[in-house]
Image (cartoon, rainbow, N blue to C red):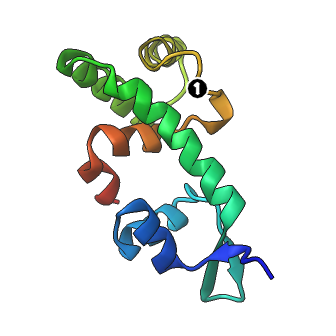
């Protein structure tokens, strides 16, 4: 019988992060997971690997940026993350998409994901 789900510790080890960080992603609903009862959390293996592939695509694009571009993108993403919808915000989305690239599918694109990749400390503060 093939294993269908990971436990929290297994996902943390796979990603090289702490279990607390994984629980933070769960709390923000930023990682595929299912609850078994009220306390047990499991992570479907296929969903986790798809999620990791989506993160890898963004990581690849970010690795190509200069430090100046990373700083500009970080500021734009922070504004987007904290702001309401407006023409200005829509313009910033265009900037973010232009910097990261069109290869990243919108439904898999997460501001929190980009913030965590640009500055992991930003994702841990909430």
The image shows residue 73 at horizontal and vertical percentages of 33, 22
**Residue in view at x 34 percent, y 71 percent:** 18
Tally of numbered tags: 1
The image shows residue 95 at horizontal and vertical percentages of 44, 12
Is 32 located above or below residue 4 in the figure? above
Which residue is more in the foreground, 121 or 83? 121
Q: Please give left or right for residue 89 compared with residue 34 in the image.
A: left
Is 34 located above or below residue 72 in the figure? below
The image shows residue 94 at horizontal and vertical percentages of 51, 12
Which residue is more in the foreground, 36 or 92? 36
Which residue is more in the foreground, 27 or 11? 11
- Which residue sits furthest left? 67
User: What secondary structure is found at the residue carrying circle 1?
Assistant: loop
| Quadrant for the C terminus in the image | bottom left
Q: Please give left or right for residue 3 compared with residue 58 in the image.
A: right
| Quadrant for the N terminus in the image | bottom right
Evaluate whether residue 21 shows in this view: yes
Is 61 located above or below residue 109 in the figure? above
- How crowded pointer 1 is (Cα within 10 Å; few <14, some 14-19, many 20+) is rated as some
Q: Which residue is mark 1?
A: 104
């Amino acid at each position: 019988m093939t294993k269908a789900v990971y436990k929290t510790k297994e996902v943390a080890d796979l990603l090289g992060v702490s279990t607390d960080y994984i629980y933070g992603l769960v709390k923000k609903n930023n990682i595929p997971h299912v609850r078994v009862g009220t306390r047990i959390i499991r992570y479907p293996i296929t969903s986790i690997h798809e999620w990791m592939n989506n993160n890898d695509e963004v990581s690849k694009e970010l690795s190509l940026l200069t430090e100046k571009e990373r700083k500009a993108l970080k500021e734009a993403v922070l504004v987007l993350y904290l702001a309401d919808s407006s023409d200005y915000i829509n313009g910033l989305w265009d900037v973010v998409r232009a910097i990261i690239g069109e290869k990243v599918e919108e439904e898999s694109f997460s501001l929190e994901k980009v913030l965590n990749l640009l500055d992991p400390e930003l994702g841990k503060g909430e």
